[in-house]
Amino acid sequence: MALVLINGPDNAPSTSADWDKINDVLQTIGLDINKPTRIKDGYIQRGSVLFFAGAWYVADSDTAVTGVQSDYIKLVNTAGVVTAEYVSALVDVTFNRTWNGWYDPDGNMYLFDEIKAYAAGAVTSPVTIKNYRPSLNWSKAISRVLSAANLARLFRLDAEVVLTGSGNWTVPSGVYWIEGIIIAPGEAGQNGTTQGGHGGDAGERRYFGYAVAPGQSITYACTYASTIFGSTTLLAGGGDVGGMRSQFLGASGGGIGGRGGAAGSDGENGEDGEGGGGGGGGPPLPGDPLSFGSGGSGGLGSVRIR
């Protein structure tokens, strides 16, 4: 039900019990030869091997990690009992070459994905990744790819997220880079007059991409006046231009916009989420100069993150 200490032999093994301890250590090392995944779904997996401050430990069952799940796990040894807890960040954690692990000044050990930590700037360099330092010309090519800025791009969302309405979006665990499109709302179509109304322009579509940190909160709001995501605000319009009015029909809105109205009819609304322009209102019916149609409203925008 926990991480079990594997006792080593005395410095000069002389009894059968000492040789049994040597065998136990060798079996423990054998368990770790293939380097199986140690952490899954908030548990240290049964059979996982840890070399903690000069001693070997084996999880004899799936062992829970306490706290709010994050990318970093701290192991604390209290009188020979090892417990595991999630922490939100690495504070004063460096690589200890005596024990070949990551430790803080209090002797607590840390488990984490070094590539993710490097991408987040939590460590200055990966240390234990096999073949991290390639030879010949590959070293120059891969060293560029493994820069913190580019590496962050590897840790993105598993699937696209579409934001509408308003609120605060929280960056999920394990995500260090987001990119996508901010779509502004479309403009409303013009009302008909003696002719049909112009179609409204579609909303601007602006692409973005930048580094983030898990747990970071980003404000967003999609209204008929603007689309806001973080520090970026896009006002209505600015995208595909709406159609020009004619004597007989209102013009269609830009983008995925609404159709213009026929004589005496209103223009259709632009498509929400796509920032479509509203269709222009239709001209008046013959003999009824006040029967012109109203322009359709522009569609709401959205934020699409991937």
Image (cartoon, grey):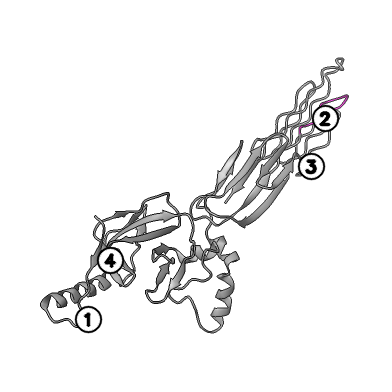
Q: x and y percent of residue 168 in the render?
A: 58, 41
Q: x and y percent of residue 280 in the render?
A: 78, 30
Amino acid on which disc 1 is placed: Asn
Residue at x 35% of width, y 57% of height? 84
**Mark 4, mark 1: which one is toward the viewer?**
1
Q: Is the residue under label 3 in contact with that under label 4 (CB below 8 Å)?
A: no
Residues drawn in magenta: 188-195
**Mark 4, mark 3: which one is toward the viewer?**
4
Q: x and y percent of residue 63 in the render?
A: 30, 55
Report which residue position mark 3 lands on. 241
Mark sitting earlier along the chain (1/3):
1
Up/down of 78 relative to 147, above or below: above
Mark sitting earlier along the chain (3/2):
2
Look at the numbered disc 4 and give the secondary structure of its residue.
strand
Q: Is the residue under label 1 in contact with that under label 2 (CB below 8 Å)?
A: no
Seen from the viewer's position, the closer of residues 60 and 305 is 60
Q: Quadrant of residue 179?
A: bottom right
Q: Is residue 129 visible from the viewing direction of this image?
A: no
Amino acid on which disc 2 is placed: Gly
Report which residue position mark 2 lands on. 197
Separation of residues labelled 2 and 1 (CA atoms): 93 Å
> How many residues crowd around disc 3 within 10 Å: few (fewer than 14), some, or many (20 or more)?
many
Report which residue position mark 4 lands on. 57
Report which residue position mark 1 lands on. 11
Q: Quadrant of the N terminus?
A: bottom left
Separation of residues labelled 4 and 3 (CA atoms): 67 Å
Mark sitting earlier along the chain (4/2):
4
Tally of numbered tags: 4
Look at the numbered disc 2 and give the secondary structure of its residue.
loop
Mark sitting earlier along the chain (4/1):
1
